[in-house]
Image (tube, rainbow, N blue to C red):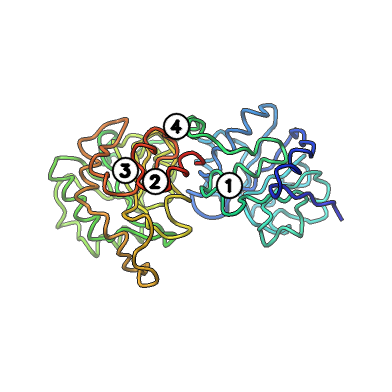
């Protein structure tokens, strides 16, 4: 059985332990769930690319994430569940941002040939195949997911927290080299992404309808995005025949590459804390994230990262406690569509109109000056830690 090294518990122990050399080939096991989870690996990936440019990176993850992983600069992509021609045991190191067992990577005996296998200490599958366990937080810090991902680089000596300038420097990505459907605008539109595939608390649907009406009344083109099922949900609540001119629906029509092109050309976008929000932030588009003050899904954990990205929540802490439910979250409903519309218009290619957001809690981890000036809570600490 391998000797298991534990990182992140005591700074003195970590400082005394020799750092591992950069491998010739490194396998990155990407998050198996949403697009936002994959994009939160970007700061760690950028640090790896700067610190060990000679290391050949391979990403193992969801097939749907291939376009965005390529945008992030990793072109050797392997889709999980496709074992043809793939041998995880041939790599010099494995860095896992996912909690997976040995079977996910193939034969456990082959994994034993990999000298360095890094993952989270709190993962359920960790005892089976990892030999470097990293505590991605200590006493609850750092809060932000991107900073927790950075801690996984501790065995290589690159696990220190990122500063706000470093987080901002990770952006922007370039969009995929694909074309949009002819009926969708290329520039000057606002993207509204109402749903989150059930991964987070959502802004009330009637607020989205009101926001689209307010923007359309100001002659701002509006494009809704989402899955095909989400398009149908929107159509049931707001039939297309009742929508004003200039309100378009791209739901169910775009893959991730096309979505990146639509977001890159947008003057602004807004969404709850979901993948397209983080993609827009990574592309450098002014992005406004709407969050509930609930543990695990609030700003301190998932604020978008980017020079023009801002996250807001109405309260520092939820005033309703257990009475606040996902289906009718009063904390989300308190984010008024009139203020969101004012923040998105007048439009700028480089920034949102932040004045209307002043009553709310604001966080912008990729812009330290903005976060310190606007924050109304201990989220100032989040700006420093990401």
Going from N to C along the chain, the mark reached first, 4 or 1, is 1
Going from N to C along the chain, the mark reached first, 2 or 1, is 1
The label shown at residue 172 is 4
- What residue is pinned by disc 3? 269
The mark lying in front, picked from 2 and 1, is: 1
Q: CA distance from mark 4 to mark 1?
A: 21 Å
Q: CA distance from mark 2 to mark 1?
A: 20 Å
Q: Is 120 rendered above or below residue 185?
A: below
Name which residue lies at 76% across and 55% down: 129
Q: Are marks 2 and 3 in contact (CB under 8 Å)?
A: yes
Q: CA distance from mark 1 to mark 3?
A: 26 Å
Going from N to C along the chain, the mark reached first, 1 or 3, is 1
Q: CA distance from mark 2 to mark 4?
A: 13 Å
- Helix, strand or loop at disc 4? loop
Drawn side of residue 183 relative to residue 140, left or right: left
Going from N to C along the chain, the mark reached first, 2 or 3, is 3
Q: Are marks 2 and 4 in contact (CB under 8 Å)?
A: no
- Helix, strand or loop at disc 3? strand
Please tell me how crowded label 3 is: few (under 14), some (14-19), or many (20+) other residues with Cα within 10 Å. many
Name which residue lies at 36% across and 39% down: 263
- Helix, strand or loop at disc 2? helix
Name which residue lies at 21% across and 41% down: 221
Please tell me how crowded label 4 is: few (under 14), some (14-19), or many (20+) other residues with Cα within 10 Å. many
Q: CA distance from mark 2 to mark 3?
A: 7 Å
Nearer the observer, 264 or 278: 278
């Amino acid at each position: 059985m391998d000797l298991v090294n534990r990182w992140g518990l005591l700074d003195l122990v970590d400082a005394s332990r020799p750092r591992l050399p950069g491998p010739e080939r490194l396998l990155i096991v990407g998050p198996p769930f949403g697009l936002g989870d994959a994009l939160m690996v970007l700061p760690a990936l950028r640090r790896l690319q700067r610190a060990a440019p000679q290391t050949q990176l391979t990403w193992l993850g969801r097939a749907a994430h291939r376009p965005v992983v390529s945008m992030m600069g990793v072109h050797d992509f392997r889709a999980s569940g496709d074992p043809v021609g793939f041998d995880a045991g041939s790599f010099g190191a494995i860095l896992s941002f996912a909690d997976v067992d040995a079977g996910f990577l193939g034969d456990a005996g082959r994994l034993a040939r990999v000298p360095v296998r890094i993952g989270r200490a709190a993962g359920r599958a960790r005892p089976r195949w990892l030999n470097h366990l990293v505590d991605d937080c200590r006493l609850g810090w750092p809060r932000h997911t991107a900073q927790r991902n950075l801690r996984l680089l501790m065995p290589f000596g690159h696990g220190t927290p990122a500063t706000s300038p470093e987080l901002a420097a990770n952006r922007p990505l370039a969009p995929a080299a694909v074309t949009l459907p002819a009926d969708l605008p290329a520039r000057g539109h606002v993207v509204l992404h109402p749903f989150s595939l059930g991964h987070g608390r959502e802004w009330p649907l009637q607020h989205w309808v009101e926001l689209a009406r307010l923007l359309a009344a100001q002659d701002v083109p509006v494009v809704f995005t989402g899955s095909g099922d989400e398009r149908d949900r929107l159509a049931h609540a707001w039939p297309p025949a009742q929508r004003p001119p200039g309100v378009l629906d791209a739901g169910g029509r775009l893959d991730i590459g096309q979505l990146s092109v639509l977001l890159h050309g947008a003057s602004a976008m807004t969404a709850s804390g979901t993948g397209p929000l983080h993609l827009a932030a990574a592309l450098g588009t002014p992005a406004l994230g709407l969050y509930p003050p609930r543990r695990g899904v609030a700003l301190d954990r998932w604020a978008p990262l980017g020079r023009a990205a801002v996250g807001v929540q109405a309260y520092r802490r939820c005033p309703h406690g257990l009475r606040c439910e996902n289906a009718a979250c009063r904390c989300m409903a308190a984010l008024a569509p009139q203020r969101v519309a004012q923040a998105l218009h007048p439009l700028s290619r480089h920034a949102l109109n932040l004045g209307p957001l002043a009553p709310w809690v604001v966080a912008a981890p990729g812009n330290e000056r903005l976060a310190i000036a606007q924050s109304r809570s201990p989220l100032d600490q989040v700006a420093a830690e990401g």
